[in-house]
């Protein structure tokens, strides 16, 4: 399978439950009912008035199976197409889903097929929707509840970049583009402003109960908007003024901070005046309610620090300088700075204000550092190991919740709000769009499925955390962390191969290949660099398994070669590369598949933007020619991200900015666009498993619809 160097907020189940039945009604969590709307012309009595049978009963009831969606999934759509198959020796007469008649795709008056494909499009209510299929054969025999699936419809958006009001326990922020709030007590979300692009920065001002945000307008200025928020309604955004963009410097990072102590806004603008990163910063101040202009309060001059992040206190701005490794206090009146703590060497992501200006909290990748200013001491709260399910990947906003004695940290990779107990340091998830148990997936780099389609195995590159391998239950979406690959060399993601008969999973990272017993969780490192005879690897990019011979083919993107590792003897043999075989030299191999029927390897080349057909016996390689337009598989080498093989259809699947299917027999090809994906794995019946950032999705290639199985 493949690895690459190529990142929908869905799924917290709400309390509504929509139960399918012959009445077509939805039952919600409080016991009330609401009738599902449908465009179908078939009503419930159509099911009971099916045509009389002219075929004698064979005494056997028909079967029906739902192919899409899976048993448990989620979507942010308001309708879904349920698709499946039904079969009986006498032929299928009708299929109903929640009392609504499905279309029989292959029905014919002159031919009575024993298996019928069927589909029906039905509306979704917010919360859990249960769909049940009933099938009747031509003999009049009926199977009720032949199959059932549950789909969660949710528009939940997690504001990982947020402001926090501890008195009301409410988060305010944008997620990903809309302005939202979330009440942590009631678990209710409100969307205040729907937007189609990301604001520059925003903050909630407690005193005026308003959310302020800066909107990109043009190259000359930003627009400042205010949204008045109360318990009853949300006002339309009102433009409060402009922020002129400094044409002398290129803005690098910005942050808007609301100061409820003095009813003011502060805007931090960082600039890069050289190629050495941020080396100049300015802080502007704007008094609220006076239509005043933005006034420059602070600017990096001489030895004054470059400000990376800041938070407001009653008397001053508490700021951190990553360049000078210093915590400073900046006067709100004159902008003068005073050093509070020097020589702080950890990499700070965010800064939070404590109960006084003597208590400063800094978020790092390890946890929360409490800096005691009078004692000039540092203590770390909530430090965890790299394999912890809640190890930070992309931490952002941090706020102290003094009422519950905890810190709230938004992690955009996890799409979650994580709490760290102020006293014990224990971590927990406060808010998440997660589906399935265990920790949140960050970025799925490879997928492989077992033969019964009951479990999927994924390589999660971990973002800034360590790489992980998860086993995902295809019925529930629950995740189980398996093995201990203990690697953060995730530049190229990861690659998986499954040997189900031996209950072994092979996992490759850029620097290692592991063998994982997925029943005992035992992990063995195949220490290729320590083998006395064989090849030394520089940058492992993909693996492919020949189960019959016990050969694990391993590609090296840096040394431009493919090596075979005998998983029984641990011996390695050069298969193809500069010193073996004829043909074009590889260029940044990032995908590898093996076709056992023809004893052929296929390797995708990031550098060439093509696919090589490789003979493992001779090492000879030829560019795989297709009838595709050149732009489908070539000319865009940076877009080749995954290579997989559909053995049932004898097709290569090349993932770039779209999914291209190439028939290896006649070289014909076709393509579809399913949005930005990192990895794919073909399934029977025109379906794809796909990794889209941290979501494991099921794509129905017949309809183009997508659901989330796990996150």
Image: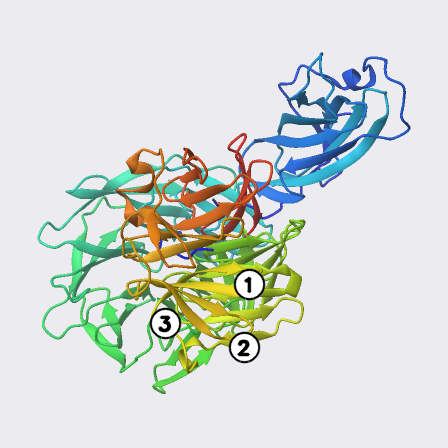
* Point 66% across, 32% down: residue: 84
Residue 125, horizontal then vertical, whole percent: 63, 33
Q: Nearer the viewer, residue 278 or 350?
A: 278
**Do the residues under discs 2 and 1 have CB atoms within 8 angstroms?**
no
Pick the residue in front: 123 or 183. Answer: 123
First in sequence, mark 1 or 3: give its number: 3
Where residue 226 appears, as percent x and y from the top left, is 34, 42
Any part of residue 679 in sight = no
Circle 1 SS class = loop
Residue hosting label 3:
537
Q: Earlier in the sequence, mark 3 or mark 2?
A: 2
- Residue density around tag 3, few if under 14, some if 14–19, many if 20 or more, within 10 Å: some
Residue 588 shows in this picture: yes
| Image location (x, y in percent) of residue 305 | 19, 72
Around disc 1, counting alpha carbons within 10 Å, would you say few (fewer than 14), some (14 to 19), or many (20 or more)? few
Q: Is residue 398 left or right of residue 57?
A: left
Q: Nearer the viewer, mark 1 or mark 3?
A: 1
Specify whether 21 is left or right of 247: right
Kind of element beneath mark 3: loop
Q: Could you say where residue 573 lies in the image, as x and y percent from the top left?
A: 42, 70
Question: Which residue shows up at 39% across the image and 46% down it?
Answer: 210
Mark in front: 2 vs 1: 1
Quote the CA–CA distance across marks 2 and 1. Answer: 56 Å
Judged by depth in the image, the label closer to the viewer, 3 or 2, is 3
At horizontal 31% and vertical 33% (from top left) the residue drawn is 629
How much space separates mark 3 and mark 2, taking CA atoms? 46 Å
For label 1, the residue is 549
Quadrant of residue 491 within the rendered picture: bottom left
Q: Residue at x 73, y 40 (%)?
A: 30
SS state under label 2: loop
Colour scheme shown? rainbow
Mark carried by residue 1: none
């Amino acid at each position: 399978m493949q690895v690459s160097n190529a990142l929908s907020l869905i799924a917290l189940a709400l309390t509504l439950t929509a139960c399918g039945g012959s009445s077509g009604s939805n039952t919600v969590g409080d016991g009330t009912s609401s009738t599902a709307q449908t465009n179908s012309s078939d009503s419930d009595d159509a099911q009971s008035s099916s045509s009389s049978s002219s075929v004698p009963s064979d005494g056997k009831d028909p079967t029906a199976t739902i192919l899409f969606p899976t048993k448990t999934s989620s979507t942010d759509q308001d309708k879904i197409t349920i698709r499946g198959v039904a079969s009986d020796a006498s032929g299928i007469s009708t299929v109903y889903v929640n009392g609504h008649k499905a279309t029989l795709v292959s029905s014919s008056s002159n031919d009575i097929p024993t298996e019928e494909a069927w589909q029906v499009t039905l509306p979704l209510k917010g919360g859990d929707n249960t769909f049940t299929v009933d099938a009747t054969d031509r003999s009049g025999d009926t199977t009720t509840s032949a199959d059932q699936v549950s789909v969660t419809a949710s528009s939940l958006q997690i504001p990982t970049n947020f402001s926090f009001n501890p008195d009301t326990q409410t988060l305010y922020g944008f997620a990903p583009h809309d302005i939202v709030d979330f009440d942590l007590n009631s678990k209710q979300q409100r969307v205040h402003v729907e937007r189609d692009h990301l604001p520059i920065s925003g903050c909630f001002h407690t005193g005026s109960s308003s959310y302020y945000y800066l909107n990109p307008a043009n190259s000359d200025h930003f627009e400042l908007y205010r949204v008045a928020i109360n318990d009853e309604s949300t006002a339309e955004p009102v433009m409060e003024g402009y922020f002129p963009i400094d044409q002398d410097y290129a803005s690098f990072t910005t942050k808007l901070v609301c100061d409820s102590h003095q009813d003011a806004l502060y805007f931090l603008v960082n600039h890069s005046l050289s190629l050495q990163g941020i080396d100049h910063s300015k802080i502007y101040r704007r008094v609220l309610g006076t239509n005043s202009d933005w006034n420059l309060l602070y600017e990096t001059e001489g030895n004054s620090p470059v400000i990376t992040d800041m938070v407001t206190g009653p008397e001053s701005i508490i700021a951190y300088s990553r360049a000078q490794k210093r915590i400073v206090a900046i006067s709100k009146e004159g902008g003068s700075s005073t050093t509070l703590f020097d020589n702080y060497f950890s990499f700070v992501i965010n800064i939070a204000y404590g109960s006084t200006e003597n208590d400063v909290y800094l978020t790092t990748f390890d946890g929360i550092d409490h800096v005691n200013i009078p004692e000039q001491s540092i203590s770390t709260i909530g430090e965890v190991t790299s394999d912890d399910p809640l190890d930070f990947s992309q931490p952002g906003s941090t706020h102290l919740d003094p009422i519950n004695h905890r810190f709230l940290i938004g992690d955009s990779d996890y799409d979650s709000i994580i709490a760290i107990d102020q006293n014990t340091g224990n971590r927990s998830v406060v808010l998440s769009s997660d589906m399935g148990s265990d920790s949140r997936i960050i970025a799925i780099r490879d997928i492989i499925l077992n033969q019964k389609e009951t479990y999927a195995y994924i390589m999660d590159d971990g973002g800034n955390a360590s790489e992980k391998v998860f086993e995902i239950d295809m019925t529930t979406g629950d995740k189980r962390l398996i093995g201990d690959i203990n690697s953060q060399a995730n530049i190229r993601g990861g690659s998986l191969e499954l040997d189900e008969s031996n209950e072994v999973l092979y996992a490759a990272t850029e620097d290692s290949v592991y063998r994982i017993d997925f029943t005992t969780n035992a992990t063995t490192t195949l220490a290729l660099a320590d083998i006395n005879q064989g090849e030394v690897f520089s940058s492992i990019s993909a693996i492919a398994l020949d189960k019959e011979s016990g050969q694990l083919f391993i590609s090296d993107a840096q040394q431009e070669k493919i090596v075979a590792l005998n998983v029984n003897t641990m011996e390695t043999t050069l298969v193809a590369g500069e010193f073996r075989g004829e043909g074009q030299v590889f260029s940044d191999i990032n995908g590898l598949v093996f076709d056992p029927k023809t004893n052929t390897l296929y390797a995708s080349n990031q550098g060439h933007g093509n696919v090589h057909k490789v003979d493992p016996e001779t090492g000879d390689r030829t560019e795989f020619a297709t009838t595709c337009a050149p732009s489908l598989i070539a000319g865009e080498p940076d877009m080749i991200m995954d290579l997989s093989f559909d053995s049932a259809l004898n097709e290569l699947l090349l993932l770039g900015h779209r999914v291209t299917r190439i028939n290896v027999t006649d070289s014909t090809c076709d393509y579809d666009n399913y949005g930005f994906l990192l990895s794919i794995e073909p399934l029977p019946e025109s379906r794809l498993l796909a990794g889209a950032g941290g979501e494991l999705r099921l794509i129905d290639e017949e309809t183009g619809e997508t659901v989330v199985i796990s996150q």
